[in-house]
Amino acid sequence: MIIGIIGSGAMGAGIAQVVASAGHTVRLLDQNTQALQRAGKSIQGSLDKLAEKDKLTVEMAAAIFARLHLTEDISSFADCELVLEAVVEDLGVKQQLFREVEMLVSETCLLASNTSSLSIASIAAACQKPERFIGIHFFNPAPIMQLVEVIPAVQTRAGLAEQVRDLVQSWGKLPVLTKDTPGFIVNRVARPFYGEAIRMLEEGLADMATIDWAMTELGGFRMGPFALMDFIGHDVNYRVTESVFTSFFFDPRYKPSFTQKRLFEAGYYGRKSGRGFYSYAADAALPEP
Ligand code: NAI
């Protein structure tokens, strides 16, 4: 299968690695040359590490990388059988992308979004053929995280969700079919997890390190809420919170916090920018994911 992925940031690059590893030809597109080059390097680095750990042979790693084609030219998507976007969490941008994609691809090409929080129906609504549209929501880092949410929209044709679920399973992932409701399963449950942690910090009940420590050491979570928000990125995480809050008609259970909004406004996105709740300067101790 030839799969086109739009957006080569944290998610797009990881998803490209997953599907190339599963044997597909991948066209990975970004409008930003540096982002595309970074993605190429990070996928190469990740495959090299797997080869060092004997999880892949050097030849297998090279074959996977050879299936990956980095591009800034969307016309190269004409032969794609599935196009999945992982660009900025902005409805207008995603809708505009699919208008362009549909003018290029065949009528049978499937269209999918990796959105964390926007309604699949609203993105599909921009398409000429919304019945071939579906949500395929990976988790970060995509090559490591097993779960993938598969989300049919009201417009999605009958049977497509099951077909995509089987496809995702063939990539070595654990798919779960979810309803097209704000945040789907995981991001809905995660909003109060982050929100309460920030509220506890604001109320002075405990500091970040203590809350993170309690959740990992005592609660059994892989990462505490502050380390996890820094890992995801506040640009992404804050937008998702705002979107879930709005989509639930301003239900206060999902209300965003000013503390996170200020980090977002300042460009303190977390690990990716060197500073978020924690500092990631070269000499600072990093909480590990
Ligand atoms: P990111 O900021 O790391 O990457 C987004 C990439 O899209 C950038 O490289 C940017 O240059 C590119 N881009 C933006 N507009 C574009 C356009 N019109 N055409 C081509 N490229 C364009 O973002 P990230 O974290 O990879 O998130 C992407 C999507 O995945 C968002 O919808 C987000 O909600 C979702 N998501 C994010 C997760 C996370 O933990 N970061 C987890 C699951 C889903």
Image (cartoon, rainbow, N blue to C red):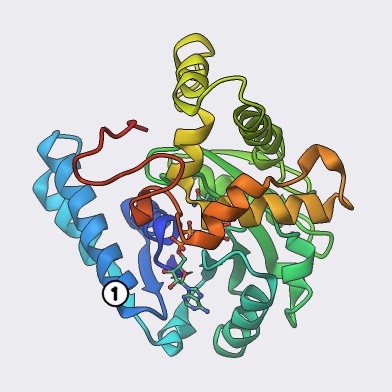
Task: Tell me, yes or no, if residue 7 can be seen here.
Answer: yes
- Nearest to the observer: residue 266 or residue 45: 266
Determine the residue positioned at 52% across, 18% down.
215
Residue type highlighted by circle 1: Gln
Q: Position of residue 105 (x, y in %)?
A: 55, 83
Whether 91 is drawn above or below 115: the answer is: below
Q: Is residue 183 left or right of residue 275?
A: right
In the shown orientation, is residue 258 left or right of residue 41?
right
Indicate the position of residue 208 as horizontal and vertical percent values: 49, 28
Name, please, the residue furthest toward the front.
204
Relative height, residue 202 to residue 60 (above, below): above
Which element carries disc 1, helix, strand or loop?
A: helix
Q: From the viewer's perspective, is 234 left or right of 152? A: left
Name of the residue lying farthest toward the top = 218
Q: Is residue 146 visible?
A: no
Which residue does the numbered mark 1 point to in the structure image?
34
In the picture, which quadrant includes the C terminus?
top left
Identify the image quadrant of the N terminus: bottom left
In the image, 84 versus 181, the foreground residue is: 181
**Disc 1: CA contacts within 10 A as few (<14), some (14-19) or many (>=20):** few
Q: Image quarter for residue 63?
A: bottom left
The residue sitting at 85% across, 41% down in the picture is 252
Depth check: give the residue in front, 215 or 33.
215
Residue at the location (40% across, 39% down)?
278
User: Would residue 270 be found to the left or right of residue 219 on screen?
Assistant: left
| Residue situated in front as seen by the camera: 103 or 158 | 103
Relative vertical location of residue 269 with respect to residue 70 in this rendering, above or below:
above
x and y, in percent, of residue 239 in the image:
63, 57
